[in-house]
Image (tube, grey):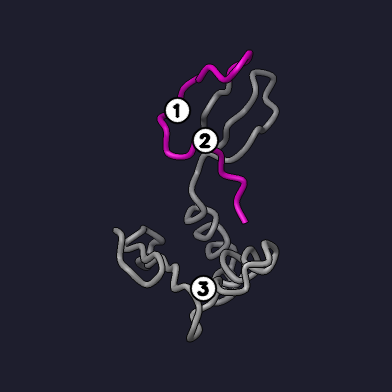
Amino acid sequence: ISDTSFFCGVPEAEYPFGDRSLIVKDGFARLPDGTISGSACPLTVGAKNMFDMGFTPAEIAVMASVNPARAADAYDRGELKNGYRADIIVLDKDFNLKAVFSGGKQVK
């Protein structure tokens, strides 16, 4: 599961946020005092990090889809099974996003 904030994918910079600001740098959104406020990188980056640490793609798939679905009591998704929603992302060997399916229909 990722704690990616809505700062995911924005250029590194300081952004006004309510009565304070957040600094996006090195994949994190931080408060001015350096406290991490959330991630600023997509889940695919975390998946690649797990792969680089020695986890298998199957183990990563469970961590990134099955476990979050179960934690959210969403028992019709998270796995490739008959009757499930078929919300799927396709990554290449370098964990770059290649396709997105929602409810079995390709949307990217």
Real-space Cα separation, disc 3 to disc 1, in angstroms: 29 Å
Residue topped by disc 1: 12
Q: Residues within 10 Å of mark 3 (few under 14, many from 20)?
A: few
Label ID, residue 26: 2
Q: Quadrant of residue 70?
A: bottom right
Give x and y (percent) for residue 42.
48, 49
Say if the magenta span includes residue 20: yes
Residue at point 53%, 65% (across, down): 51
Real-space Cα separation, disc 2 to disc 1, in angstroms: 8 Å
Mark 1 or mark 3, which is nearer the start of the sequence?
A: 1
Q: Does the residue at mark 2 contact the one at mark 3 (Cβ under 8 Å)?
A: no
Label ID, residue 35: none
Mark 1 or mark 2, which is nearer the start of the sequence?
A: 1
Residue at point 52%, 39% (across, down): 40
Can you say which quadrant of the picture contains the N terminus? bottom right
Q: Does the residue at mark 2 contact the one at mark 1 (Cβ under 8 Å)?
A: yes
Give, as a single range, the part of the protein colored magenta: 1-21
Q: Amino acid at mark 3?
A: Pro
Real-space Cα separation, disc 2 to disc 3, in angstroms: 25 Å
Q: Is residue 94 left or right of residue 63?
A: left
Mark 3 or mark 2, which is nearer the start of the sequence?
A: 2
Residue topped by disc 3: 57
Q: Is residue 72 left or right of residue 26?
A: right
Residue at point 54%, 77% (across, down): 79
Q: Does the residue at mark 3 contact the one at mark 1 (Cβ under 8 Å)?
A: no
Q: Is residue 62 left or right of residue 33?
A: left
Say if the magenta span includes residue 3: yes
- Describe the element under mark 2 as helix, strand or loop: loop
Q: Is residue 66 left or right of residue 12?
A: right
Residue at point 65%, 23% (across, down): 31
Q: Residue furthest bottom?
A: 82
